Image (cartoon, rainbow, N blue to C red):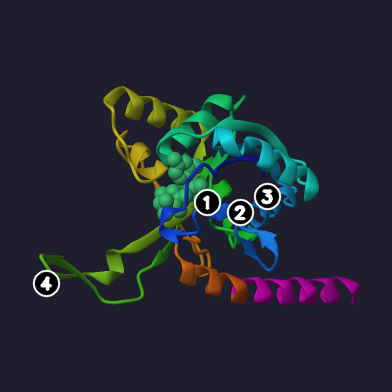
Amino acid sequence: MEYTVMLPAAGSGKRMGAGFNKLFLEIGETPILIHTLRVFDSDPDCAGILLAVKPEERGQIQDMLGQFGITKVKALVDGGEERQHSVASCIEAHEGAGVVLVHDAARPFIRRDVIRKLVDMASAKGAAIAGVKAKDTMKMARNGVVEKTVNREALYIIQTPQAFRYEVLHEATKKAEEDGFLGTDESMLVERLGHPVHIVESTYDNVKMTTQEDLVFGEVLLKRKQEEDLDDADRTRL
Ligand code: CTP
Ligand code: MG
């Protein structure tokens, strides 16, 4: 089923400490941003990509799109102060309805089967987000002292993509703007409407490249992905 993806890419990557937007850092000699774009550029179900960028990085990113042969970017919009503002710029630029995905440009290892499940669930129910079950024992603490152990069964670690029927995301964003509400993900804005948000089980390797050690993990994940792609190609030949 067809979808449009919105990729916020207008951050500064402070926690990575590179001194520039972390999305320009390379994994296997290709920028993180390009790895993420390729996932969607190569997906036949993806109708278009809306990319939020910092105005001062627009030229550099435009050049990269040409250099790496990315063809599905329909609009490069100006990102904002916070991630939510960058996503809002993408929503403004979107024409038409259907299912839209919001995905951190800093998560290059999202799998296509998870994308499919999210799109199908959002189409049927209005809102669906990627998440994995917490693996570790989880505790609530105050000032470094445990208050209680939380029931792990009920806890999910939430990632992106987050998928919505366009009108649901549009209404949620409009309401958040009116109320001056700032959330850490799009789901929070939709939850405020009282609209149910469904969780689609994702994979633990859909990591966000946030700090230096994530890059080490990223190199390993890329090698594995390249091996999987080779295996797939072998299977197709047989
Ligand atoms: N993002 C954005 N606009 C912002 C802030 C973030 O488009 N004002 C994007 C980032 O480029 C990234 C995604 O949102 O693809 C997730 O944000 P995060 O991982 O926090 O990236 P940064 O904000 O760049 O990193 P940091 O918080 O460490 O500064
Ligand atoms: Mg940030």
Is residue 40 rendered to the left or right of residue 127?
A: right
Query: Alpha carbon of mark 3 to alpha carbon of mark 1: how far?
Result: 24 Å
Q: Residue furthest top?
A: 178
Task: Point out the tag, 3 or 1, that comes first from the N-terminus.
Answer: 1
- Quickly name the residue at label 4: 146
**Do labels 2 and 1 touch, CB within 8 Å?**
yes
Query: Alpha carbon of mark 2 to alpha carbon of mark 1: how far?
Result: 8 Å
Mark 4 closeness class: few <14, some 14–19, many ≥20 residues within 10 Å: few
Say whether residue 44 is magenta: no
Give the residue drawn at x 54%, y 74%.
Answer: 216
Q: Measured along the vertical axis of the image, is residue 223 above or below residue 46?
A: below
Mark 2 is on which residue type?
Phe
Q: Nearer the viewer, mark 2 or mark 3?
A: 2
Say whether residue 235 is magenta: yes
- Quickly name the residue at label 1: 20
> Which residue is more in the foreground, 68 or 36?
68
Q: Main secondary structure of the magenta part?
A: helix
- Quickly name the residue at label 3: 40
Query: Alpha carbon of mark 2 to alpha carbon of mark 3: how far?
Result: 18 Å
- Quickly name the residue at label 2: 24
Q: Position of residue 134 (x, y in %)?
A: 35, 70
- The segment highlighted magenta reads 221-238
